[in-house]
Image (tube, rainbow, N blue to C red):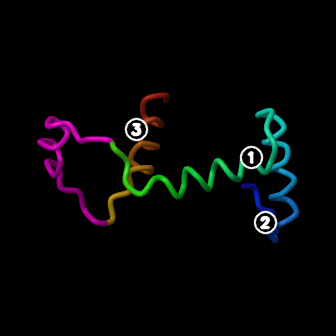
């Protein structure tokens, strides 16, 4: 049974969401309903962790202030000099 729901959202967000829904050939209501349904059904995914991944977990110890994005940016900068 469908029920009407009223939401207060930022005007820009609404316009962008309408454009997105139109590009996906769906209604904004369907888009939001599907999102909320997925959000509430994803209590815990059924994905299992393989033994290989489990064995690799905790192999590397990184400092708490480690910045992976900076490290990757530095790597790419050096690679494409």
**As rendered, which of 42 and 4 lies closer to the eye?**
4
Secondary element at image label 2: loop
Task: Report the residue that reaches farthest toward the top.
Answer: 80
Task: Report the residue that reaches farthest toward the bottom.
Answer: 8
Q: Residue 5's mark?
A: 2
Q: Residue at x 87, y 53 (%)?
A: 15
Secondary element at image label 1: helix
Instruction: Give the Cα separation between the discs numbered 2 and 1.
Output: 12 Å
Q: Is residue 61 above or below residue 5?
A: above
Q: Residue 75's mark?
A: 3
Q: Residue at x 41, y 42 (%)?
A: 72
Q: Residue at x 85, y 59 (%)?
A: 12
Q: Main secondary structure of the magenta part?
A: loop
Neighbourhood count class around disc 2 (C-alpha, 10 Å): few under 14, some 14–19, many 20 upward: few
Of circles 1 and 3, the one toward us is 1
Q: Residue at x 46, y 43 (%)?
A: 73
Residue 19: give x, y in percent of width and height.
Answer: 85, 43
Neighbourhood count class around disc 1 (C-alpha, 10 Å): few under 14, some 14–19, many 20 upward: few
Q: Can you identify the residue that label 1 sits on?
A: 30
Instruction: Give the Cα separation between the discs numbered 1 and 3.
Output: 43 Å
Of circles 2 and 3, the one toward us is 2
Q: Quadrant of residue 13?
A: bottom right
Q: Which residues are magenta?
A: 47-64
């Amino acid at each position: 049974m469908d029920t009407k729901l009223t939401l207060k959202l930022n005007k820009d967000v609404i316009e962008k969401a309408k454009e997105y829904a139109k590009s996906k050939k769906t209604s904004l209501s369907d888009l939001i309903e599907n999102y909320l349904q997925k959000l509430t059904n994803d209590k815990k995914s059924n994905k299992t962790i393989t033994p290989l991944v489990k064995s690799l977990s905790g192999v590397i110890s990184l400092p708490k202030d480690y910045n992976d994005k900076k490290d990757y940016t530095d790597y790419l900068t050096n690679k494409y000099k």
